[in-house]
Amino acid sequence: MDQNTSNSLAQDKVLILYVLNNMKRDITESDLFKLISPINNMNYFYFKQVLTDLVDSKLVGTYTKDDADEDTQAVYVLTSDGKNSLNLTIDVLPGLLKLKTDTTLKNEINNIVAEDSIVTEYIPENEHSYTVKCKIVENNKTIFEIRTFAGSNEYAKLISDNWKANANSIYPKILNLLTEKS
């Protein structure tokens, strides 16, 4: 491994530690990648390798949230060893990269939180039947979920797209209907 590759690898590891240190919440691998990739154009496979190295060296911890959901995801956190390593190696990150990281975090974290909070998926049951799940998730906990059936892929996609675009108005209407006294 040449010196430039070694420096770049060290810088990329410190960058991930820096981002995790500045997170105010647990973060999934995909959300972490969404934050890291625009900062230094890291491809997914390289990112995965660097993250795995950090987990293997116990600088980053991972766990699965206990949730009633069947589609739980692993989340990543900075360990105390990771914080110590970051404090010792923070100078590896150039000032411009730190500034770009801080700016990206400030701009993108709200998008990621909003994206994570409104979730929808449709699952084919057979050729002409789909189950559509629409959820609202806050702090990695499902606070609302509704499932329905769709008779075609197009109808399932329409329901899914409509939920993503209008969940903020649909959810209160459903809640009002459910809590309305007859």
Image (tube, helix red, strand yellow):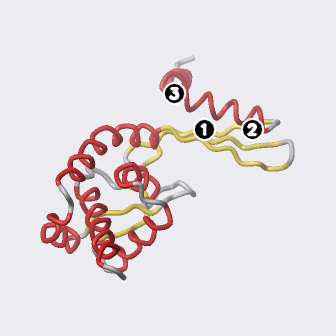
Q: Which residue is mark 1?
A: 146
- Residue 164 lies, with reference to residue 130, above or below; the image says above
Label 2 sits on a secondary structure element that is strand
Q: Earlier in the sequence, mark 1 or mark 3?
A: 1
Dot 2, how many residues are within 10 Å of its Cα: few (below 14), some (14-19), or many (20+)?
some
Q: Earlier in the sequence, mark 2 or mark 3?
A: 2
- Looking at the picture, tell me which residue is in the foreground, 47 or 1: 1
Dot 1, how many residues are within 10 Å of its Cα: few (below 14), some (14-19), or many (20+)?
few
Label 1 sits on a secondary structure element that is strand
- Residue 25 lies, with reference to residue 91, above or below; the image says above
Determine the CA span between mark 2 and mark 3: 18 Å
Dot 3, how many residues are within 10 Å of its Cα: few (below 14), some (14-19), or many (20+)?
some
Of the residues shown, which amino acid type is indicated by label 1? Ile
Q: Which residue is mark 3?
A: 171
Q: Residue at x 31, y 37 (%)?
A: 107
Query: For the view shown, which residue lies furthest in the top direction?
Result: 182
Q: Which mark is residue 149?
A: 2
